[in-house]
Image (cartoon, coloured by chain):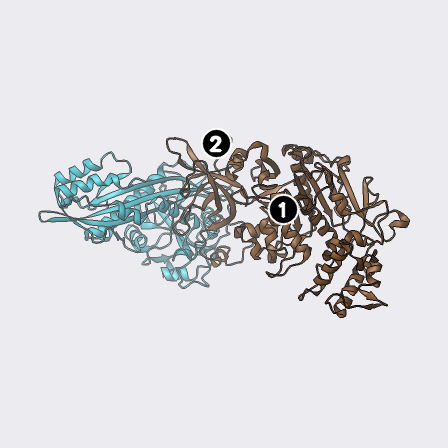
Chain colours: A cyan, B brown
Amino acid sequence: MANPFQPLQGALGVLVSQAEVLPATGQAVVDMVTSDLDEIYDQKTGGQPDVEKVWETDVRALYRTVRPIHRTEKHGFRYFLDGSARTYFIGTVLEHNRATPVQVSQVGAAMVKREDDGRIRVAASRRAILLTLEKSQVSDTLWQALEGAIKGTKGYALCDSATNNRYADEQNLQEARPRGAHRANWYMRELELDLARSVQREDGGWLVMDGSLGNEFEDWDGAPLVGVAKTFRRDSLFKLGTGPRSKTLNLFGLLKDLQENQRTLVFSRNDEGKIVFWYVRIRPQRGLDYPLMGVVKVEMPNPGRQLLNSDMVDEISGWLVAERRVTPYGRDGRWHAHLYPIYIAERVVRSLFYSEDALKSGIRWPFKSA
Amino acid sequence: MTTKKDNHPIGRGSATDRDPNTAEKFQFWIHPDQTVNPFDIVAAEHFPAEGSNEPSRTFGLVTNIKHFTDAGSHLANLISNDFGEEVNQPPQTPRQGANVAEAAVLSNSADIYMPVRNESRIYFADEEDIHQALGIDGIPEQRRVPAGLIQMSNGAQAVAYLDRDFVLGPEAGHVNISGISGLATKTSYAMFLIQALLQKSAQDEIAVILLNVKYDDLLHIHEPRELSEEEEKVWKQLGLEPKPWPEDRVHYLLPNGKQTHTTGRPNCFADPLPQQHKVYAYALRETAPKLDLLFSDIPDPNDTLGAIIGEIMSGLSGNEPAWRAVQTWDDLLTKPPLVQQGIPQKFQNIHPSSVGRFLRLLRRVVKTRQTGIFVSQLFTRMTTIEKEIGNIKGGHTYVVDIARLAPEEQTLVFGDVLRTVYGLYSGEMLPFDDYTPPEKVIIFVDELNKYAPARGHGESSPILDQVLDIAERGRSFGMILFSAQQFLSAVHERVTGNSATKVLGRSDSAEINAGNYRFLDQDIRYHLTRLDKGELILSHPIYRQPVKIRFPRPPFRQSRAAK
């Protein structure tokens, strides 16, 4: 079997021949992104924590009970999308007094489709292997040589960790290695967006994306979709109503009385209504450690900014509640909020990756022996 | 070829970190819409042979199928169903799962025994593949004996052929069939296989001796039975004629009964009696050389019985003066030299009490419990087993009925058959004329455990010695034992061990854990408990693994037991 990372060897050869390389001790080392990236991204892109606008037609009650709608009754959610990224630090390149980490990432996204009989099949997938450096820390000559080595190699890309890196920018990350890891995750986000836009879906087939939608969906003009976040910002403050019966609730206050099979009212992000969101409790609080467990945050693009029909939101929430079966319990710490088809999409992506053993063995600095 | 246009892959090879494929076994996941069962034979694409571009094929016998899901525990499954509350509605998304089959490697078309690779395409084997997989393609056409149909889950069928040189010798011999009774399988299969051998051999090459041990199971083998179209088709598919035994080539030997002299009816279950029958019986003088067989089940640790029997056999056979007055069973029991005025006598150096014990035992067998085969003199219309079996002819079948006999009598008759055949073939009996026994003789007996029970080493009995003689040396003389019993573990291992071809029907779970089944893969062993009527597991020296076969019902009228 050929070395799957052979196409990278040319680029690594360029680095070895044109700069000084300090290889990572003990081969490639995994670089992690911030553990609660979704939550931070939600916080950073979600605008002000104060939520004042309710964005639906029926506002008589804060909580609305919904009925789980099984796919055999009405199959709303048919497409599910998730991505994954793994980044490995493989060494440091020195050019005079400049230095940049060199990282290799495996990045992928997959959209799965659920057929009417419940079976899942892969609708589309994307995969890329990234070589990431901080461009400003190497000479233009070296960068161009790297581009030349990578260019035209399908499935491989050269990335600058300093640019096009919203995850790192939103967190104001300065460290080069975490920035590299976040760059890969942003690349993954772009792959997800590309899949969401480009895959032709059956009429009426809704897409569920994993995580918060972010501002990039504010002007969404594609087929219907929602983002479902398992973790989300907790600093939100909900100012409901005016006058003597008005009340202000923080997120915990809002969700502590949210019962199984209930949703909250629909709120607007930034009071603009381009992205609206609400919370659904898909699992009862009993047996869970924490009031926020078992609750997902649903986000939906609303480029027309019109109030959402409450019945439609009930229906979407009903589809969502039905998704609690099956659950990847025991496989993921966030099982209580995980949607199984999303979990499967992630498994599909992971199955596209080469194993860590293969990566560690396949990526070798081409030093010339003395 | 596996790439035949009507043959689609059914899955792909699957080797994991913890569950690797080896030179002996491989695993493959099965397409969700595909049905695969244990005993299916599959072909995996493999490395091409040296100098070829075509992939070679590794054949495997499916031994087990497992279903895997991504549930970490049973608890995960319970929680997935709303903490156990939901038991009716199908899951919103069925849990991801895979059926993974394990296959024992049979062979590779290019003799490549590297493990089957991950992702290798897997196909159902077709008939040609199955023959190659099992090694049947190496059996010369003239030596192929159809032994049943291998039926695959995709509907493909292949004839399982035995190599007659490994059934009738010289390479190996004997067939042993096990399985619980009530499924009418063991005897039916033995009869099917014998018919196949007869039809695929020269007309006068093989003589057959069948012992009928139950009802009138084998007393109508010349009478045709109406076959369904499907049954007829299977016979044809196997290349055999669905015909009963030719009437002029079947000889029924029925035991004399207590009432036979008045009613003329032998002591058997058949009604009406087969036309071409003879009645056999045992008079003392004709029985003398096999008197020891009557006492096979009697413990004789000091060999006192053996000594008395030896003296009597020698005295009667040699017509010694002391024994001349002893002509009948009554004479033996009441007259000198063993008895005087009703009192047992000291005989040679044997104590009177031992003689008395012998007489008590003999009286019980030939007088008290006898069913009528022990007679004072043989009448003209009576015959003996020795006489009939001593003149067997090739192409003829002899059915010896012992169904209604007492156990000791059954042992005597079976032993008599074996001793006579052994004498014929080993040269111990010299014919006075130019008679030559047929090239091969097949002896079929059910309930072999009665005659050759599993015992501790060192124990023996006259009948066991006789069976062992046939099992261990018979093949070289042309004597082939087809035997059957409910439990393989109940039969002497030197008999089963010498049976090159083993056939297993449904067995119970306690039985399959006996050491006698070690030759089977554990998964296959458990499958024995699930076999249906008409299904058998066939193990043959040519086959690299046992296979599951079906066979057609006999074309002759079956007994009331079968009805």
Q: Chain of mark 1?
A: B
Q: Give whichever of B21, A326 is nearer the camera.
A: B21
Horizontal and vertical percent position of residue B472: 60, 49
Horizontal and vertical percent position of residue A65: 48, 55
Q: Give whichever of B536, B357 is nearer the camera.
A: B357
Crowding around mark 1 (Cα neighbors within 10 Å: few <14, some 14 to 19, many 20+) is: many
- The secondary element bearing badge 1 is classed as helix
Q: Which residue is mark 2?
A: B1
Marked residue nearer the N-terminal end (2 or 1): 2
Q: Which residue is mark 1?
A: B474
Q: Mark 1 is on which residue type? A: Gly
- The secondary element bearing badge 2 is classed as loop
Instruction: State if disc 1 and disc 2 touch (CB < 8 Å).
Output: no
| Residue, far right | B262
**Taking A24 as reference, is B272 left or right?**
right
Residue B65: mark? none
> Is residue B443 among what the camera can see?
yes
How far apart in space, not on screen, are marks 2 and 1 (Cα)? Answer: 42 Å
Residue drawn 81% across the image and 43% down it:
B278
Residue drawn 49% across the image and 29% down it:
B5
On whether disc 2 and disc 1 are found on a single subunit, the reply is yes
**Taking A167 as reference, is B357 left or right?**
right
